[in-house]
């Protein structure tokens, strides 16, 4: 970091001015370093998940998944986070205005996209609901194609005490759970174990509890959750509105602080360059 040569007639002017530059600079360095480490962690987790599934040995597996592979989201978040952290860190250390502008600009764009998404969800609720329903059904079809997708769906169903997108009957769209007469799977006319109502006394989950359960609809409520996950998520949001709002505000504040620190450093660098 170059000497910024702040001039002042008073004896304490120069140290105070230097500290006014140094403190935001250190805060920015600390923040972007955390971003870089988080990005590396996400990327490492993504590639580890792929290696566990054998994708790295056979990349064609990526195109054979019919549903959504959560690893893609992990890698995307990790990649964006690392690039942002790298740009902010190098930009601050090298006092590179272009990298700092890139850093603040991308964070500003992400903040704008977050606000836009929030507004669109509120304004176009029915369209968003239909899209989520289609997305859930598409992933039901690919439930057995990817272990991470399978774990994600199971987690959503267990945490929200739900089954399927709208009803448990949605699982008929999966070739393994379909009631089609040509289906020879043992899971025929069943649902995943995550749909089952677990007895609190059972210490171990019976993974075969959903077998044949859809053959008799009158027995559904005794053995499985009958509420769809779309309705369950709609019920969850009002109950946790304050938590969601707090998380959104905290993330937004961190983004605005990052933009402020980067723009403040840019202004200091340009001021010094102009003074020379």
Image (tube, grey):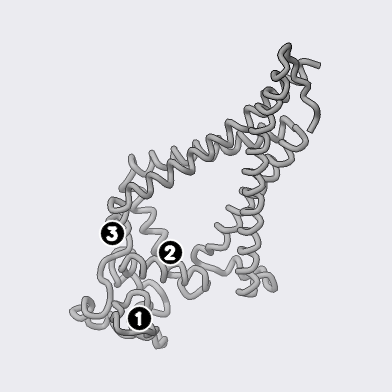
Relative vertical location of residue 214 with respect to residue 167 in this rendering, above or below: below
Q: Residues within 10 Å of mark 1 (few under 14, many from 20)?
A: few
Relative vertical location of residue 61 with respect to residue 112 in this rendering, above or below: below
Residue at the farthest front position: 11
Task: Determine the CA span between mark 1 and mark 3.
Answer: 27 Å
Residue 130 at x, y = what percent?
Answer: 34, 53
Residue positioned 43% across, 64% down in the render:
138
Residue positioned 71% across, 14% down in the render:
10
Residue 26 at x, y = what percent?
Answer: 67, 38
Label 3 sits on residue: 231
Relative vertical location of residue 113 with respect to residue 70 in this rendering, above or below: above
Residue 43 at x, y = what percent?
Answer: 64, 59
Q: Which mark is residue 180?
A: 1
Residue 69 at x, y = what percent?
Answer: 53, 64
- Residue in the foreground of this view, choosing between 104 and 169: 104
Residue positioned 28% across, 76% down in the render:
224
Q: Residues within 10 Å of mark 3 (few under 14, many from 20)?
A: some
Residue 242 seen in render? yes
Task: Determine the CA span between mark 2 and mark 3.
Answer: 17 Å
Task: Mark 1 or mark 3: name the one nearer the start of the chain.
Answer: 1
Task: Determine the CA span between mark 1 and mark 2.
Answer: 18 Å
Q: Are marks 1 and 3 in contact (CB under 8 Å)?
A: no
Q: Which mark is residue 138?
A: 2
Q: Residues within 10 Å of mark 2 (few under 14, many from 20)?
A: some
For the residues carrying marks 1 and 2, which lies nearer the camera in this image?
2
Q: Secondary structure at mark 3?
A: helix
Quarter of the rendering occupied by the N terminus: top right
Q: Which mark is residue 137?
A: none
């Amino acid at each position: 970091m170059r000497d910024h040569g702040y001039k002042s007639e008073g004896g304490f002017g120069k140290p105070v001015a230097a500290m006014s530059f140094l403190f935001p600079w250190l805060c920015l360095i600390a923040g972007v370093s955390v971003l870089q480490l988080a990005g590396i962690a996400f990327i490492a987790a993504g590639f580890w998940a792929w290696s566990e599934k054998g994708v790295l040995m056979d990349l064609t597996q990526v195109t054979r998944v019919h549903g959504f592979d959560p690893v893609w989201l992990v890698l995307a978040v990790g990649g964006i986070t690392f690039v942002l952290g790298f740009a902010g860190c190098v930009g601050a250390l090298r006092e590179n205005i272009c990298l700092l502008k890139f850093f603040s600009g991308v964070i500003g764009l992400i903040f704008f996209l977050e606000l836009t998404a929030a507004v669109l969800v509120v304004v176009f609720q029915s369209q968003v609901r239909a899209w989520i329903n289609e997305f859930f059904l598409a992933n039901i079809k690919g439930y057995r194609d990817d272990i991470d997708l399978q774990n994600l769906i199971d987690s959503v169903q267990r945490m929200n005490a739900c089954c399927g997108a709208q009803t448990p009957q949605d699982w008929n769209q999966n070739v393994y759970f379909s009631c089609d007469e040509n289906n020879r799977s043992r899971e025929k006319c069943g649902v995943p174990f995550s749909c089952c109502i677990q007895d609190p006394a059972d210490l171990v989950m019976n993974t075969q509890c959903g077998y044949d359960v859809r053959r008799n609809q009158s027995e559904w409520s005794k053995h499985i959750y009958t509420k769809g996950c779309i309705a369950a998520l709609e019920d969850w949001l009002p109950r946790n509105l304050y938590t969601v709002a707090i998380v959104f505000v905290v993330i937004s504040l961190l983004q605005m602080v990052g933009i402020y620190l980067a723009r403040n450093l840019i202004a200091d660098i340009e001021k010094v360059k102009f003074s020379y």
